[in-house]
Image: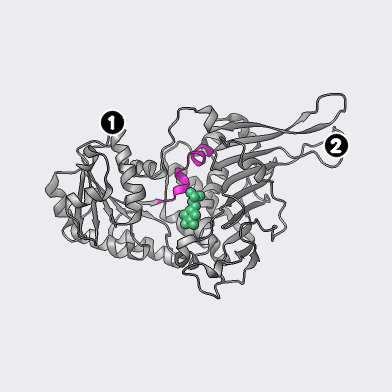
Amino acid sequence: MPVSDSAIIILGASGDLAKRKLIPALERLFQKKEIDDTCRVIGSGRTPFSHEEFRAHFNRDKEFSKLLYYHQGTEGIRDFIFSLREFRRVIIFFSLPPRVYAHTAAELHREGFRDETTLIIEKPFGYDLESARKLNADLQRYFHELQIFRIDHYLAKEAVQNILVFRFANAVFYPIWNSRYIESIQINALEDIGVEDRGAYFDGAGIIRDMVQNHLMQLLSLLTMEAPINLEAEEIRIQKMQILKALEVKRWAKMQYRGYHDEKGVPEDSKTETYAELEMTINNYRWTGIPIYVRTGKAVHRKGTEIGIRFKPGPHLLYNTEGQIPPNQIIFNIQPDAGIVMDFIAREPGGSGRISSTNMTFCYSSSFLDAEIPEAYQRLLLDAIRGDRTLFVSAEETELSWEKFTPTLQQETPGMYKRGALPPSPLGIDWIDFDKYGSTCRLD
Ligand code: BG6
C-alpha cells in the first residue's frame, strides 16, 4: 500500500542536500508507487521562490513536480500546507545546521505542529555528552521521543542491514558467536579523500566524533547484540543499548595526515585527528575479554569499510604447518562492493601434506543480479514516512555512546601520517589484511 495523505516538509530546501539527495529520493518513491499523489512535498527556506520556480529548480519528472510547493520560512507554514488539503501525517526533514535544531523545533511547535508530526534530523547529535543531552532535552520539550527520527546513514546500507540476518537467520553461526570461539572483532572504515570542503566542520569534530561515536558503534552493536525477541524497532533498540552500556574503550591513538593544516577552514595549529585507532571491549557474559579493534581514517590509500571476525584456533594442532595455522575469519565487506568472505583451511592438492588458507565468497552483485539496492535516503525517508523507527537512533543510544567516548575527546597532539597511506598501527594491533578482501566482489 502506498503512503497517502502525508505532507513532507523539507526545511532548508534550497540547499545542496535537497537537490542532490532528498528530492530525487522522493521522486523515486513516487515513481515506485511507495507514496501516492495525495502526498505533497513542501520546501521551505530563506530563498524566495514561487512554487513554479521551486519546481524548476529541481527539474524533475512532470507528474512528481506537481506535488512540489514552496513556503518561505516557517512562519505560517502549517496554515499553508493545510490550505493545500487535509493531511493525516506531517514529516519534517531538518536539512539545517544542527545549531538551529532546538530553535526550529520550538518554532514548529509554536506553529501548531503536534502529534501528527515526525521530525527527521541528521548528525551531529551534539558535540559531547553534555551537548547531546541538551539537544535531546530541547527537542523533547516540544516533541515526544517517538516523533524524533535521528538518521545514521550507515544503518541504511544494505550490507549493514544484513548483519542481523546473517547472525539470526543462520543457525550455524549462533553457537560460535562469543568469546569462547572468537579471538577478536575488527572494524575497518577507510576513506581515500581528505576533508575536502568540509574542513571547518570537520576540524571542530575529528574522526572519533565524525565516524566512531555514531556509525561504527552502530555497526558494533548489530554485530554483538543479543537476539531481540522479535524485529520490532524497540526490541532491537533494547538489545543495542545493552551493548553500549557494557562497552569499555580501553586504548586509543589519534593521528593526522600531513597537509591537513593546508585544507580550507583548518587552523594552522589544529590538533584534530583525521585517523583513529581504538581498542574496546564489551563487559558482558558473551564478550568479556575479547578485544574489539576499530580503525578509521581519512586520506589513506583506499575507500572501504569492512568488519572482520577472527576465530581462535582449534584445541589441538594436527596438521604439520610451519608456524601457525591461519585463523578462520569471516569478513563482512560493507562497501563499496558488498559481500561476505569466509576464510577456512583446505588441503593443498598433491602429496605434500600441506594445508593452506582459502575462502568462500558471497557477493551481492552475483547472488542478487537484478536487485535494485535503494539509495540510503530513499530507504530512510520511506521508513520515516511510514513511521518505522528500526533504522533510526534513539536519544538514549546517542547519549550512552557519547558517555563512553568522553575520555577520547580530549585534545591531544596527534601523530602524523603520510597522505594517501595507511599508517602502521600506532597501537601495535595485529590487523587483518583487509586490503586483500576489499576487492573480492569488485565488478571490473
Ligand atoms: C559522514 C561523515 O557521516 O560519513 C563523513 O561526516 C564521512 O566525514 C561519511 O565521509 C562516510 O560515509 P560513507 O557512506 O561514504 O562511508
Q: Secondary structure at mark 1?
A: loop
Looking at the image, which residue sits at the far bottom? 269
Query: On the image, which quarter does residue 334 sit in?
Result: top right
**151 over 160 or under it: above or below:** below
Q: Is residue 139 left or right of residue 433?
A: left
Graded by Cα atoms within 10 Å as few (under 14), some (14 to 19) or many (20 or more), the crowding at tag 1 reads few
Q: Is residue 2 magenta?
A: no
Query: On the image, which quarter does residue 170 sit in?
Result: top right
- Numbered marks: total: 2
Query: On the image, which quarter does residue 176 sit in?
Result: top right
Looking at the image, which residue sits at the far left? 83
Residue type at mark 2 is Thr
Q: Could you tell me if residue 387 is visible in this image?
A: no
| Mark 2 lies on residue | 321
Placement of the N terminus among the 4 image quadrants: top left
Residue 435 picture location, percent across and down: 65, 45
**441 over 113 or under it: above or below:** above
Placement of the C terminus among the 4 image quadrants: top right
| Mark 1 lies on residue | 1
Q: Is residue 60 left or right of residue 80?
A: right
- Residue at 62%, 72% in the rendered image: 413
Residue 239 picture location, percent across and down: 50, 45
Q: Is residue 155 magenta?
A: yes
Q: Nearer the viewer, residue 182 or 125?
A: 125
Looking at the image, which residue sits at the far top? 350
Graded by Cα atoms within 10 Å as few (under 14), some (14 to 19) or many (20 or more), the crowding at tag 2 reads few
